[in-house]
Each structure stands twice: as structure tokens, then as C-alpha cells.
Image: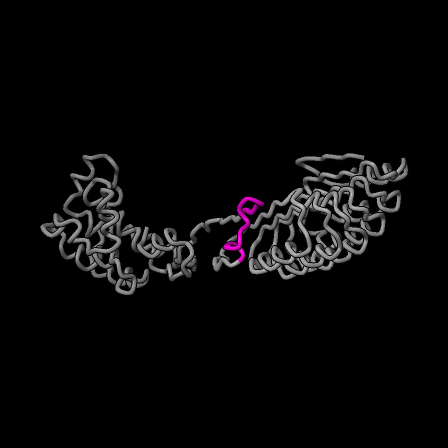
Amino acid sequence: MSPEVFNYLKNNTIPKTDFSKADVYSIGLLAIEAYMKRSLEAIQWLNLKTQNVFKVIPDLKTSKHQDFLNKIVSKMVEPDKDLRFFPNQLLNNLMAFNIDKKSLDHLQYQKSSFKSQKNKFFNNIFSYGIFAFYSNQLKQKQDLQPKLEKIFKKLNMTRQNIQKSFYESANYDYDSLTIDLIDQLVNVDEAKRISNFIKVYHDITQLNLNFSQNEIGVEEIQSITNSIKNFINITHLTLCFSLNEIYTKGCKIIVSALINYQNITHLTLNFGSCQIGPKGVNQIANAIQNYQKIISQLNLSFYNNMIGVEGAYSISDAIVQQINITQLSLDLSYNEITDIGCKCISSTIKNLHLTLKLRLFL
């Protein structure tokens, strides 16, 4: 692992740097270990992040392969990336060394093989191995910059840890935001404060908001919705507002945010016992239809909202469009959808290609 990658992972709040030479450094470490026929010690591994290789491993100064070590290896493991080889520079410099391709046929991991190839290892086998590796990469026109796996950073907020310091935080580098304030009597003023906190995390890909059982009304919904309208990168969205006074007007406000999202693959909406009625369900259902080609998991809960047959038809129209859905959870209990609504929902589900899970409450 190169110094720049190591520092980035260690201090993950600093701006991303250039990793175009990181692979060269990593291969250089492998070269040193192969030459010494042992792994680097922990202290050596760390010291190489800041010190010259000959200072960290003095034994290399007496090597009979000084020419290769000086001109190639030391330039590969140079701590300062500005002085380190680019991949193409490494290839060009390797050309100056003789390559015995036949020696590759005798390359083995047994100790005896290392002994027999000891005098030719760097000048022949290793240099050719690097040359072959990078030549293949160049032929395929692949990007040599390392594709580092991104650290997925989550921020979870509850009543216990929401403090003024969090609202004033300058660290917005998160991928997932969860705010769980179920049954916490969130009032209008607190809803506005929370909204101001949420809106700075507009680059997140996962958002989970749980404001169930808070006596939240239209005004609070307006504040919260305004803060998430511009979260266009969201792929996983969970909104739980059950047991609140949302009404049809509140649904319309929430839909104004939902229609902005074009990348939703996992959607969970819980509006159980929110007095939204058939019109509110229809508004949400119309918004869901925008995701017809991308949603794979859909969880909807509209229990105890008196949506009736009309609401059942709206939901049926929404889910029948989800051609790529594999998992569906649907709670329409206590809604007087009658046998007609049940048959409509059942008929729709039969036409879906669910491969993982189905949960249905009618």
C-alpha cells in the first residue's frame, strides 16, 4: 500500500489525492520481499512510507544487484510520489535490463528454485514479469490507476446523540444518513433544525428517516421535505411517518421530493395510520411509477388509511410497472379495500417476477 493510499485511508476526511503511481509502489514492495525471500517486518513496512529503501533495509546496499535496485526498485518505492516512477516510466527503464524469457519456465515458489535463480532474479525474471504485466495492461487500454474500494461511511442519529455540535458539524463526507426519532414529540421548531442539518448531506446515496409517532403535521413535513429535495444521488430511501397527521396535503409535499429521484433501487415508505386516504395514496403511487425500470426492492405500508378500492387500484397500477422488482412488501390492512381490491392486488402480483420475497397484508 502506497503512502498516499495509506494516508487517505487513515485520514479519510482529507481530499482525495492522485493514486496513479500507487500500483508501482505496491509492486516495488513485492519485489523487495521476493528478493529477501521473506515478508517485510511491520516496522519496515511503516518506515518505507517515509524513508528511503536503503535506509530502512541497509542490507540491500551490499547486494550484487545494486544497479537494478538503484535504478528500478528504489524509484518504485520512493515515498514521495512526485519522485516515483509512473507506470510508463517504469516500463521504459526496465528496457535497459536484459530479459531472459526462458528463465520464466523455471520460476517456482520452492526454496530450491530461488537458489537456482538467485543471480538472475532481478535482472531477468522479475523485470520481465513487470514488463509482461504492464504490457498486457497497456494492450487492453486499461486504466492503471488503482480502483480503491470506497469506505462506506454511515451517520446514525437518535435522540441521545443529536446535539448542537452535530448541527454545526463541518464534516459532510458521508454515504448514508439515518435519523431515528420515533415517538420523540418532534415539534415544528425541532423539525426545522433537523431539516437544516439534513440538507447539507445532499451527496449521500442512502437516506433513512423515521419520524413515526410524533404528531407531525403538514408544516413539519414541509420542512423535512424541503431539506431532501436535492438528494439526487439517492439509491436507497426509507421514509417512515406512520401515526402522524400527514393527510393528502402532506402526501403532495412528499411527492414533490420523490419525483426528483432518478436512481432509486430500494424504496421503503411507511405511512400507516396517517389519514392520507385514497387521494394521498394515488399521489404516492404516481410518483413510484417513475421508478418502473430501476426498483428492485419495494416496501409499502399504508395500513389504516381508509384507502378503499380506489387506493388499491392506485397501488396496483404502481407496482405492475416495476419490471425489475425482486422483493415486495405490501401492508394494506384495515383499509376496507374489499374483495375487489384484494383481487386487483393479487392479480397484479401474479404478473411480477418476484425471486426473493413477498410479504402481503390485506
Q: Which of the 4 image quadrants contains residue 339? A: top right
In this rendering, the answer to whether 301 lies above or below 133 is: above
154, 157: nearer the viewer: 157
* Residue 27 part of the magenta-drawn span: no
Identify the residue at image location x=63%, y=54%.
190
Q: Residue furthest left?
A: 62
Q: Which residues are magenta?
A: 156-167
Q: How many marks?
A: 0
239, 220: nearer the viewer: 220
* Residue 161 part of the magenta-drawn span: yes
Report x, y in % for residue 242.
73, 43
Q: Which of the 4 image quadrants contains residue 196? A: bottom right
134, 345: nearer the viewer: 345
User: Can residue 267 be seen from the camera position used here?
Assistant: no
252, 44: nearer the viewer: 252
Report x, y in % for residue 74.
21, 57
Identify the residue at image location x=52%, y=54%.
166
In this rendering, the answer to whether 90 lies above or below 332 is: below
| Residue 199 in the figure: left or right of residue 48 | right
Identify the residue at image location x=81%, y=41%.
348
Report x, y in % for residue 171.
48, 57
Q: Residue furthest bottom?
A: 82
| Residue 264 in the figure: left or right of residue 64 | right
Report x, y in % for residue 73.
22, 55
In this rendering, the answer to whether 74 lies above or below 273 is: below
Quadrant of the snapshot with the C terminus: top right
